[in-house]
Image (tube, helix red, strand yellow):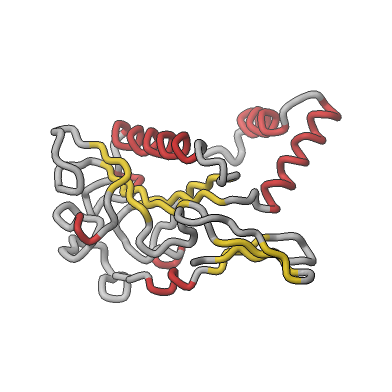
Amino acid sequence: MPELRKDPIIGRWVIISTERGKRPTDFSTLPDKKQNSTCPFCPGNESATPPEILAFRPDKSEPNQPGWTLRVISNKYPALKVEGDLNREGRGIFDKMNGVGAHEVIIETPDHIKNMVDLTDREMEDVLWAYRARTLDLKKDPRFKYILIFKNQGEAAGASLEHSHSQLIATPIVPKRVSEELEGAHKYYDYKERCIFCDIIRQEISENVRVI
């Protein structure tokens, strides 16, 4: 079982998960992105992954079989696990709890060659709908306080498999950095009676310097 441990000096929680070290990688053997018959995220290899949590299947094909356009599965090597109780525990100055949470993989396309930038508008829309569906579902679990969706593209960014995918993590704590950002947003509103994030968007669009 993974653990969450709290730094007693700066108050930051960290995840300890030895399972993450068991992840496979295909970058060392595939320097150039090409079709890979052993890729667990490719159609036909569904048995190599945990059962799907969500899938978009235009032809109404059977679960955990080919025929999908997007697929969501539990991470086979999770940083946090859904099963179990938090069992918060204090030992002197140290606090810890079981690494209970959710860790999911969103396989954005059945095409091994495509990156997110290559997706059509409709395919990208499906990815966003999947993010929304999984976020709303996990919000129902009272154990979870924070949900993060992130994407690593390529070996240098920390991805272990090259097939285009994103990840979702739900944690039982709100990260310290996020808490600080929320506190700063509250202070800004108390002072100016405006949303800081709305002001950032307006100013960036108005200056049109760093907008892509």
Q: Quadrant of residue 9?
A: bottom right
Front in this rendered view, residue 59 or 128:
59
> Is 108 left, or right, of 78 in this rendering?
left
The residue shown at (31%, 41%) is: 54
Report the label total.
0
Q: Residue furthest top?
A: 193
The residue shown at (65%, 52%) is: 175
Q: Position of residue 47 (x, y in %)?
A: 19, 58
> Is 22 left, or right, of 47 in this rendering?
right
Front in this rendered view, residue 199 or 74:
74
> Is 6 left, or right, of 64 in this rendering?
right
Front in this rendered view, residue 166 or 136:
136
The residue shown at (23%, 54%) is: 113
Picture layout, residue 202 above or below residue 64? above
The residue shown at (75%, 60%) is: 11
Front in this rendered view, residue 144 or 23:
144
Q: Position of residue 184 (x, y in %)?
A: 77, 41
Q: Residue furthest right?
A: 191
Q: Position of residue 180 (x, y in %)?
A: 74, 47
Q: Position of residue 179 (x, y in %)?
A: 71, 46
Picture layout, residue 25 above or below residue 209? below
Q: Quadrant of residue 49?
A: bottom left
Picture layout, residue 84 above or below residue 52? below
Picture layout, residue 194 above or below residue 164? above
